[in-house]
Image (cartoon, rainbow, N blue to C red):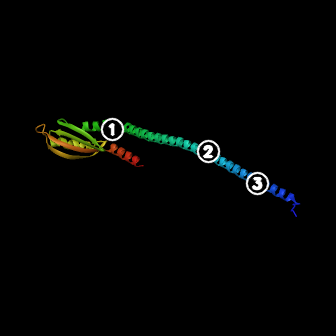
Amino acid sequence: MPQINLLPWREVLRQKHQRQFSQQTLLVIFCTLFAIMAFGQFIEHKIDNQNKQNSFIQTETRKLDTQVQEATDLRKKRNQLIQQIRATQSLQRHRGDLVRILNSISHATEPQLYLTDLRREGETLTLKGEAADNQQISSLIRHLAQSEVLENPALKNVGSSALNKGFHHFTIQVQHWKLRSAIQHEKQRGQR
């Protein structure tokens, strides 16, 4: 007897399930690909935003670095100007000292005693000159010791003059008390 399938609906149902499975599989694959692409786009968008933020931060950092450098340069210029102002003020305070020193020295000199060199090194003034006799040199030292602006005169060298016969060549070192105190004050300021 021939076999007759009385239930063709099962075959139809199986084919229908296979089609549905295939469709669902394709739909899942399509949704997965779409989700992957969307997630990739989202990540790229986040990376672009982060790169923009990074470039903005770098630009602002460069601007701030420039401003910091300008501030540093201005601070250096300010310090230089302050030093110049202090030097000018110091010169203003002590500009009359040179006149007082020269007046003290001129009042201390006698006839036939003349100075050939006057130098200042720090707080010490060095006087070189020639005198007719040793009494004039001693008198000069006494007058310098009594001066209001000079102190501690010390005779460093005495000898016969090579230029004038009968004259004595001498070297005296004396300190200027206002000048010394001003130099010490400036040194203390510089150490701060």
Packing grade of label 2 (10 A; few <14, some 14-19, many >=20) is few
Whether residue 119 sits left or right of residue 88 in the image: it is left
* Badge 3 amino acid: Ser
| Quadrant into which the N terminus falls | bottom right
Tag 1 and tag 2, C-beta contact below 8 Å: no
Work out whether residue 42 or residue 98 is closer to the camera in this orientation and state it. Answer: 42
Q: Give the mark nearer the N terminus: 1 vs 2.
A: 2
The Cα atoms of the two marked residues, 3 and 1, are separated by: 111 Å
* Badge 2 amino acid: Asp
Residue at position x 85%, y 59% in the image: 10
Tag 3 and tag 1, C-beta contact below 8 Å: no
Q: Secondary structure at mark 3?
A: helix
Tag 3 and tag 2, C-beta contact below 8 Å: no
Q: Which residue is mark 1?
A: 97
Residue 123 in percent (x, y) is at 31, 44
**Can residue 87 be seen in this snapshot?**
yes
Residue at position x 20%, y 37% in the image: 116
Residue 99 in percent (x, y) is at 31, 35
Of circles 3 and 2, the one toward us is 3
Q: Which residue is mark 3?
A: 22
Q: Which residue is mark 2?
A: 48
Whether residue 142 sits left or right of residue 78 in the image: it is left
Residue at position x 17%, y 39% in the image: 130
The Cα atoms of the two marked residues, 3 and 2, are separated by: 38 Å
Of circles 1 and 2, the one toward us is 2
Packing grade of label 3 (10 A; few <14, some 14-19, many >=20) is few
Q: Secondary structure at mark 1?
A: helix
Q: Secondary structure at mark 2?
A: helix
Work out whether residue 20 or residue 75 is closer to the camera in this orientation and state it. Answer: 20
Count of number-bearing discs: 3
Work out whether residue 12 or residue 22 is closer to the camera in this orientation and state it. Answer: 12
